[in-house]
Image: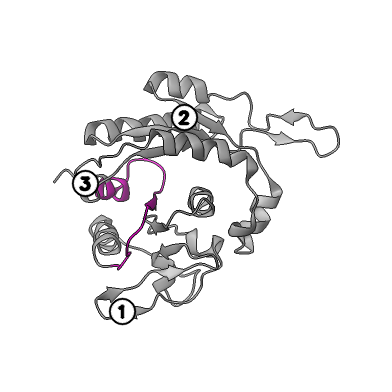
Amino acid sequence: ALLAVALHRRGERVGVLDADITGPSIPKMFGLHQPPPMGPVGILPAETATGIEVMSINLLLPNEDEAVIWRGPLISSAIKQFWGEVVWGNLDYLIVDLPPGTSDASLTVMQSIPLNGIVLVTSPQDLAGMVVRKAARMAHHMGAPILGVVENMSYITCPKCGEKIEVFGPSQALHTTGQLGVPLLGRLPLDPELARRCDAGEIEAYTAELFEPIVDRVTERVPTTKTAPIF
């Protein structure tokens, strides 16, 4: 969501495909609650207040707390429909949000959607790094290029003294990136303001200055050619 907002602020035409079918959170962050409209040639994505296009299973449920209790084939089918049957139009970037690990959702995206690159997100603990390394090796086997790693929840800044406190212990991100041979794109702190904005559906109003250098590195590393799906 932050990546989509940052790119949109730079004048890019951006869409977000929420491929986390069983745990969708993208619509709530953007304050979207109504079903997407139908067009003459298919489903139109919902549009946020600033013009970012979004498609998520949560937009199709009777209420946002409804559970999606589906097995792998149904999850894969939904993702393929979101890619192939939604009228995305002429976008500069389509950001695909995936759940952690090496689930059916990740496999479907890497097999069915032509990718320019993957951004892996970790947190300071090496336990999280282990899961990310599994996902990275899956991407490698599928031939999907990895742009780099972002470490989230790296620290919190004391509001009184400005000291950076490593709430989850010392960062293990460099250990992970070293093993994978990919760059560390940046570290993001725990920020109560971001949590409040996401809960209120106001992520587009979040300033995100610390995220800008990460966006620079992502756009610099995006290859001009896409990785073809593997069937």
Assess disc 3: are there few (<14), some (14-19) or many (≥20) residues with their C-alpha within 10 Å of its C-alpha.
some
Q: Is residue 68 toward the left or the right of residue 164 in the image?
A: left
Q: Nearer the viewer, mark 3 or mark 1?
A: 1
Give how far apart the Cα atoms at labels 3 and 1 are.
27 Å
Q: Position of residue 95 (x, y in %)?
A: 40, 51
- Please state which amino acid type lies under the numbered disc 1: Gly
- Residue sitting at 38 percent across and 23 percent down? 180
Picture coordinates of residue 140, whole percent (x, y) = 27, 31
Instruction: Identify which residue is drawn at 50% across, 21% down.
Output: 174
The residue under label 3 is 111
Mark 1 and mark 2 lie on one chain; the one further toward the N terminus is 1
CA separation, marks 1 and 2?
42 Å
Number of the front mark, 3 or 2: 3
Q: Would you name the residue on which mark 1 appears? A: 39
Its colouring scheme is one colour
Magenta residues span 86-109
How far apart marks 3 and 2 lie (CA) works out to: 24 Å
